[in-house]
Structure formats: structure tokens, C-alpha cells
Amino acid sequence: MSTTSRHVELRGPSDAPAIVLLPSLGTQAALWDLVATVLEERWRLVLIEHPGHRPGAGPTPVAASVEAYGREVLEVLDALGIERAHVVGVSIGGAIALALARDHPERIRRLGVVGAPRRFGSAEAWHERAAAVRANGTASLVDGLLERWVPTGWSDANPSERDQVADWVRACDDEAYARHCEALAKFLFAPDRTVETPTLLVTGRDDPVAPPAAVLDLAASFAAATVVVLGRSRHLPCLSEPRALATLLDDHLSGRLDD
């Protein structure tokens, strides 16, 4: 289904508690497939893609900030009649989850943030990437993104999955991708008060975007945050350690990690 400018997929029992799953920049809802197969048995999954990421969709309106993306996620929940939900995001999806917990805590039950720091590098680097995509297209990013996203050897061991990930990147509308880059250039998670939402922060041991030290720093903004470092992952453990990530999320969202 399509709600606002986003492609939305629903999985799992319709009467179960809802989990919003937000992918990384340059990927699709299918990034969560191996995690979703574990969670969908007893959770209602709402998988929301970023604007301009669906093949053949062409350019779509893209918001100017991560916070505005968060408001669009709430519009999806409103259209589905969901008042409160758990929210889980990876990379830019994690940034959106953070913004929602800071700005709209009344809508969020629990939070899962994967591969997201307070700030995603320098603004200059994001503007450079936006310019490169406008000049050369998203296909020019594939090799560099895979190097950051998955550990050495993953692509050789998973050639069909590697090709699928590359296809996701190539399918993005260039202008939409560039505008997402510009939104990340402005993003900074620095709440003026402690965030009370129970939160799980996950990163890969070798994540160059959200290294463990940056995630530990992020945890200081929460009243109750659990930090987990996955030892065989880089930036996208949804690909390299999906079952471990699914188990962590299931335990956190059900409250078992609180024990």
C-alpha cells in the first residue's frame, strides 16, 4: 500500500502490538525481511520505506529534515489507526526513530535504534555525496556503500543478496537520495532533557558510521538505554546478523531485556 509519499507493507497479526520498521538510506523494506520473519509471528509489523526508494516510482516529494520524515511516519500511523507503536530504525531510520522519541514521546512505546549516532559525520561530507549523486547517480555509490554496510567476505558468501542490495541502491531516485543526504547533514540528536522512552541501541563492532563509542555517548541521553555491540557486523546487522538482531528486538520490545 502507499500512504502519503511512502510505500508501506503490513505483516503479522492485525490485532498484535505494532512495530514500525524503518530501513537505511538507499535500501527498501526488504532490508528487514530476515528480521521480520522472526518478529511477524507475534507482532504487527509496519514497514515504511523512504520516499523515492521504490523502483519505477520516479521523483517524489521529499521532506527537508529528519524531523519532517518523522512527522510523515506519524501520518502513516494515523492513516492506519495506530495511536502508539514501537519504532525501530537502522541508520537514517534510526535517526528518524530518535527524532520521534524526542519530539513525540506520547506516540512511542519502545525504541530500537540500529547504527545511529548523535550526528552522522560532517555536513560537508553529506553535501558532497548529494552532489555526487546528482552528477553520477546512485549506482556510483554501490561499492563504497557495501564496504561500509557489511563485513569483509559477506558479499562473496552471499552473492544473490549482494546483488539485491546493489539493486536497491540503483533503484533510488537520484534527487530523492540527494535530499535525504541533505537532511542528514543537518541532523543532530541533542535533546534538552532526558528521553524517557525505553531504548535499545545496537551497533556493529566495526560500524564506521556509528562506532561503539559513539553509541555509548548516545545512550547518555536516555533514562533507560541498553547498548549491544554485535561482533560480526558493520553498519547493517539486518544483513549480517539478522537472527541475533531479531532476538534482541523481540526481547527488548517485550520487556524481557529489562529483567
Image (cartoon, grey):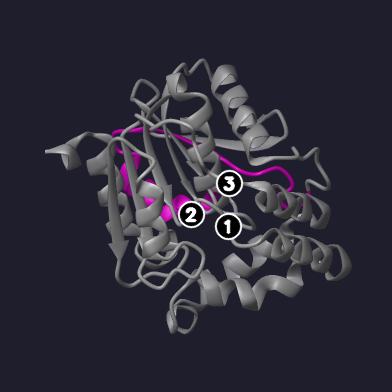
Q: Are marks 1 and 3 in contact (CB under 8 Å)?
A: no
Q: Which residue is mark 3?
A: 188
* Image-based side of 9 in relation to 13, left or right: right
What residue lies at 28% left-to-right and 56% top-to-bottom? 228
Look at the numbered disc 2 and give the secondary structure of its residue: loop
What residue lies at 70% left-to-right and 72% top-to-bottom? 141
Across and down, in percent, residue 26 comes to 64, 58
Q: Which residue is mark 2?
A: 117
Q: Nearer the viewer, residue 78 or 223?
A: 223
Q: Which residues are magenta?
A: 29-56
Q: Which mark is residue 81?
A: none
First in sequence: mark 3 or mark 2? 2
What residue lies at 45% left-to-right and 52% top-to-bottom? 33
What residue lies at 57% left-to-right and 18% top-to-bottom? 78
Magenta region includes residue 40:
yes
Rendered view: 239 above or below 69: below
Q: Which mark is residue 120?
A: 1
